[in-house]
Each structure stands twice: as C-alpha cells, then as structure tokens.
Image: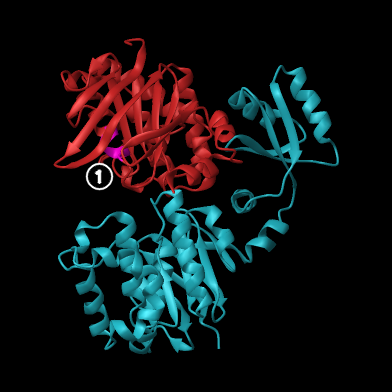
Chain colours: A red, B cyan
Amino acid sequence: MSAFAIYAENLTKCFGSFTAVNSISFSVEAGEIFGFLGANGAGKTTAMRMLCGLSKPTSGAGVVAGYDVAREPEKVKQSIGYMSQKFSLYEDLKVWENIRLFAGIYGMRGKHIASKTEQTLAHLGFEAERNTLVKALPLGWKQKLAFSVAIFHEPKVVFLDEPTGGVDPATRRRFWEMIYQAAERGITVFVTTHYMDEAEYCNRVSIMVDGRIEALDTPKNLRQQYSAPNMDGVFQRLAR
Amino acid sequence: MKALSVNNVSRSYGKVQALKNVSFEVEQGELFGLIGPDGAGKTTLIRILATLLLADSGRATVDGLDAVRDYRAIRRRVGYMPGRFSLYQDLSVEENLNFFASIFNATVRESYHLIQGIYRQIEPFKSRRAGKLSGGMKQKLALCCALIHKPSLLFLDEPTTGVDPVSRREFWDMLASLRQQGITIVVSTPYMDEALRCDRIALMKEGGCLKIETPQNIIRQFPHTLWSVQGDPMYRLLKDLRRHEDVISSFAFGDAHHVAVRSERITTLQLEENLKMLDYKNVEVKEITPTVEDCYMQLTMDNEQ
C-alpha cells in the first residue's frame, strides 16, 4: 500500500449527524493524473481536505505520499503541493517574492531557491516579469505561476482544486500541458474540475455522489460502461 | 422596439480598459449570451445595462429607455441576478421573496405563475435561512427574487460558474421555459458549451466582441476543415500534430485532438497512415463539425495575428 501516492480505505467524515464523506476507498499510483469529480455538495472538498491533512477523518484511513493523514498531517503537508483557482498567490507580492515565500514555507534552502527560481522563470518565459506584482499579471499567467509555485518544492503529490475556472479555452489547454509535464516528471496529480473535457485528460477518474464514490475507472472504460459518448454523458447519468 | 441597444459603450477602471466600444442589439424575447473568460468585460457590460454603473462613453437603451437618464424606469422593468449571491442570508427563503416583492410594490401571488416551476423546488425549505441553503438552492432563490416583479428583461451574471454539469443543465432548462413566457434574457457565462442554448451570442475577449451571431452561424463560418484525431499516446500526438506541415492548429478536446488542416493537401486516410508510421496505436481520424469553443479559439488566434 505504501507504493501508492494516495491511498484511502473507508475514509469517512461526519459533521454531526451528516455524513459528508461516506467510506470512500481508492488508490492513486505515482505519476498518475487522477480526476476527482462530483456534483456540488457531493463531498469532494471535504475528502480533499482530509487527504491534505487539513481535516481529521471521523473513521477510516488515508495515506498520502507515505504518511498517515490522521497521525502525520504535518508530514503530509510538507510532501504535497496545493493550488486552487480561489487562492494560490499573494497579489501584492512580486513574482519572485511569491516564489521565495512559498519555497521558504516548505523549508527549501536559500541557495537552492535562488537557482531554481531562475530555472522556473526561464521555463515559463517570465524572466521579464520577475519584479511584477502578481495582481498585474493576466489571469492565465497567474495560473501558470501558481502551478509552478505549487510544485516548486518537488512534492510527491499536487492537489489542484478547480484550477482552470474562468480562464479562456486556449489558456486552459496550455495549463493542462503543464500538468502532463509534471506527471511525466513523476508528480502525482489529483485534480477536481467542472469541465468534463478535462476529465478525459485524466488517466483515471472517480465520480462522487452523496458522499460515496459511485464510479472509478479510466475515462474510456467509464464511457463504455455507461454507454455515453463522452464524460459529460457519464456524469449526467450518474449525478442526476 | 429593441429590448436592448448598445452603441460604442466603453468603460475603464484606472488604466484597465474593461469595455472597448461595444455595440449590439437584442430583440424582444431573445435569449442572448455573453460568452467569454474572466476579464472579457461581461460583468461591466451587464452592470452598465442594469443601470448600476456608468459608461465612460457611448450610449445604451433598455426597452427604448436611456440607461443613464431613465434609470428609475429601467429598474422597474428589469430583473438582475449578480454573480455573487446577494440575498439576505439571515432572512428565510420566504422572507427574501416577500421582501423583494414589497420593494417593487408587487406581491408573490401576482408573479407566482412566473416562478412556480422554480419555486416549487425550494418551497419545502421556505422557512430555512437563505445562508443555510445549498449552492443550487441559493441560485434558484436568487432567480425567483429577480423575477418577483415580473420584469420584461432579465440580466443574469454568470449564474452557472462553478456549478456542476447536471445543475448547469437544469438551470438552462429553467431559462428556456422563462424564454417561452416571453421574457428577454441576457446571460453571461465562461462555459462555451452553453452557447448552444442561446438564440444569439456575443463572443467576448478583453473588453471587445470577437463576433455577434447565432451559435449555428458562428459554427458555419469556421474557416477551416476540422478533424478529430485520436491515437495513443495522446500527449506526444499533440506535439507531433503541431509539427505536421499540413496542420494549421491542434488543440486537446477531451478524448480527441481537434486539428484544423489544409484539406486540399491531405486526406484523413493519409494522416492516419502518417501517424501509424510514427508508432501511434488506435489511430482514428475523422472530419467533425466545430464546436463554439473551436470557433472561439480560432477567432482569438485570428485576432492576435
């Protein structure tokens, strides 16, 4: 089981009498792109918070990057990256300051940060934006930078919570190319999205309904199993 | 009389030009979509038309009334649902509805026929505080409140953003039935697939309109032949397609890549053969009809050149 990047067994979270996540079990291999889908209110955010070590499971077990989410939440946090559309960077800090801040929080050493910052800026083509305030960057650039910052400390797993909401179609696709590159380097990607075309880009996809995982397979197998032409069809069948 | 007439409307926030000389008209009873990503100018435009924001220049009329001079009369006849939930969280469902009815001098009973299809779904929770509703129910309540004074025109600012595909479809079904009742609807969305539910759409980017047309005509006017190309592994395939001399553009679209090609120079069979030689498995190439998203990306590229 430690071979998996993410492993959940009967993971459950209750708030009072309400069971938000109801005994979910699954595993994600290293380097896999795993799509975590579900209707609003199905329990995705709660499940993700448990896997990030931010919320203690009521029962069941979760292991992320080799650490137990209930017993070793701080170790889990050190081994993962996180990005969401709602929050990821400090708008009033410059590009390099954001990188420096997050790298420092993850305990990277100054020298290492400096050389890696150069690499990252070059890879993004952002050398000229080093001293730009993040709030002055176009949305698409912010998103690329946020993702680069989330994987800057080379985490084993990166959690992406609706990373592409509101961006234009071409930028959305370039963003997914960055996800592929990260996965090729062995980083495990755990991603939620409401864009069903993006579900097709995942190696495997799970769909949550009312706190449970109702389906989990490759997009191709899910399409066959639910005789749907695409993932939108699968989702409409399951979540209705 | 046009429901909406917008002439050269511009608006800046400091140095940022949010709207650049936008002009269009909306017919009575039309379901009109403003489609584009964040920063396209959708919210600024809607707020100007709803008389909540002044344009720097240009002129707009709503049902023939001037958006600046006649703002009071306009507010009586339009309904507005902002992007962020703006009802009173501490009032119950029923209290919110009664409150909005009373400020418009209307009663819930008079408008009940308009909202009943939607209201029935939240009626079991009518004594629950609005702040305690789920996202989907909040949205339904907000729509009921926007309709409570029987507006002739409805402005909806990104009602489906962040909403799952099933709830999105339900919401568009509600809009279709309101349209049947003769209400003019202007709705903004970042989801390109929703364009097909509109009579006409404005494709917006960075404060301007790339195109204003029916979705069907926008698709018809796509300038290239478009193929769907599959083959494993898909990510390498995308990079190889972009290098191919007969390919104009190639983008990932779910389980296939959408590839604009110089069809006078290559056939689907030839491309299939090319790809098999490059060791791709399960290769399939076929001609397809473009989606609105294909058109949007093409128009964006044309614009940048």
Chain under callout 1 = A
- In magenta, the rendered stretch is A43-48
**The quadrant where residue A64 appears:** top left
Vertical side of A21 occupied by B105: above or below: below
Secondary element at tag 1 = loop
Quadrant that contains the N terminus of chain B: bottom right
Badge 1 density bin: few <14, some 14–19, many ≥20, Cα 10 Å: few
Residue closest to the far right = B264
The picture places residue B40, in percent across and down from the top left corner, at 46, 58
In the image, taking residue A9 as reference, residue B242 lies left or right, namely right
Q: Nearer the viewer, residue B46 or B89?
A: B89
> In percent of the image, x 43 and y 16: which residue is there?
A186
Vertical side of B57 occupied by A187: above or below: above
The picture places residue A77, in percent across and down from the top left corner, at 23, 24
* Residue type (three-letter) at the residue carrying disc 1: Asp
**The quadrant where residue B19 appears:** bottom left
> In percent of the image, x 31 and y 46: which residue is there?
A41
> In percent of the image, x 43 and y 50: which residue is there?
A166
Residue B54 appears in view: no
